[in-house]
Amino acid sequence: MATSRTVPLLPLGIAALALGAAACHKSNPPPAPGRATPLSTACTPSPDFVMPSIERAPGGVPEVDLAFLAAHHCQVRVVDVREPQEVAAGRLPFGEHIPLAQVGAAAARWDPDEPVLLVCRSGRRSARAALTLEKMGFSHAASVNGGVLAWERAGGPVVRGDASPPAPSPPPPASPRDGPLGKVDVQEHLGDQAQTTWMKAAALLLHGSESCVDGRDARRVVGTPGGDAGELLLALAALEHVRGTELGAEDIDALFDAYLDAFGRFYMHTDEHAVAPLAQDPRYAPWIEDVGMPRFLRHPPRTLEPALLDDLSRSDHVGCGHLRLILEHPDEYEVRPALARSTIQAAIQRWWQGGPIDFVILEGDHHEGAVVNVRLGHEVHAFSRVPTVAPRIGSRAMFVNHPEVAAWLRQENAAFLFEVVPALRDRPASQQAYADTLARLGQVQLRATLTHLAAHLPVFDAVYTADGVRVARAEMPRVAQRPVRD
């Protein structure tokens, strides 16, 4: 979900980052004749160090400059998110290397109050990493402006050769049981304050995102079916229902651009199982073998973009279970397959163009053992504090759904469309019909996805109050009957 908007929509958002211990490099060799004077990397740890307020770049990314990195690298956690071959070609003499595609699971283990500086080649990937950490609840995460390229140009010392592998993180504790999760399991997990981060509901509109109910996400999430992609598709499907006409490709592109212009970011995920078969396609195989799957998907040759766009929007290559099920069972979800494919394609195209799209490849298999509805027990407003929760319980996980938060965000989404679609804005009856349709379709689609993915799992309501969280058994959501047209 182009000009100024009175009501923001949910931005998106993202994959998760992890970091390692930063070593303190205290001395440097004298500069070679004729070369730039190296940055001073003298750094003395201090127990009284306090991370200063971090400035944001024009695009909204929290950033620090090279001088700050050089002066404080021993007082913060420094993480290089580049690929191994890049690191071998030249890396900072301090910090830890964790490739961007692998840092999500590790990030869930770090203290979100610890300062973290992210480094990559030029600042693009580290910017994405910093925003991802923010969404996970990290208070002091920032990208290093200019990256390793700028560091070298400024005369900063680099080390060549393969980096020592980071110390492996301890394996997650085994799940208390192999079958479905019980009430006690969920209560103990959510009762652990380290598994929950609180944020203002308004921050979801300004800096956060809705994630999918998928339990493989390593971040603390606000979950709805399909996350941002699912919510935008839901909003567009409801619009078609109320208008009685189909949205064309140009309409979808225009609405998608208005969404990005108003709200800044968009999150959509796939998974490694959905994209892995692309490596067997003779059109793509040489490129994937040369640069790897993540880089190929991010920067495909222009000649292959049309074919790849078509493939990535087909159900067998869509890794988000909610979006895949919509493509496979469109009547059940009351969504046109062409609308779903066009929405997915609009996101991918803007990702290729460098737009504010977080297109994440989730790793691993599904190990969800329960469905958990995260509830506040009261109506949500912009000033309400909302709990984002970690879906993983040791080696297991849970489907996380925030029904009250989702209902509030859908009201905001509806207000956005009322502004940009004259047929809704100019007719109050259409506004009410749209709001009713959006609410009903949301329940239809939630129930359909949980029925397909979690019909055998127990459902719990986790009610957060000032006294803590209380977990109780619940039922699958019920769906209002579809109104009959005259």
Image: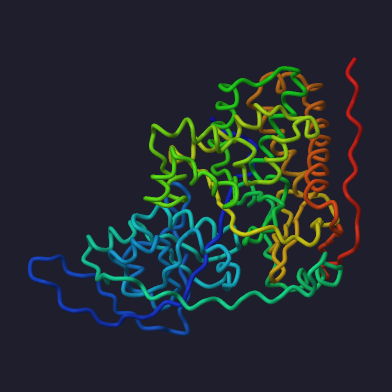
Instruction: Pinpoint residue 305: horizontal percent, then vertical percent.
Output: 45, 34
Nearer to the camera, 85 or 282: 282
Q: Position of residue 224 (x, y in %)?
A: 73, 48
Q: Position of residue 425 (x, y in %)?
A: 70, 23
Single out the residue that lies furthest toward the left: 33
- Viewer-nearest residue: 139 or 237: 237
192 vs 5, left or right, is right
Residue 417 sits in which quadrant? top right
**Quadrant of the frame with the N terminus:** top right
State the image coordinates of residue 48 (x, y, percent, origin top left): 47, 82
Q: Quadrant of residue 35?
A: bottom left
Of 297 and 435, the residue lying toward us: 297
The residue lying at 32 percent from left, 80 percent from top is 25
Quadrant, the C terminus? top right
Residue drawn at x 40%, y 50% is 289
Q: Height in image: 205 above or below 163?
A: above
Q: Is residue 230 above or below residue 246?
A: below
Give the quadrant of residue 338.
top right
Q: Is 226 situated left or right of 286 in this image? A: right
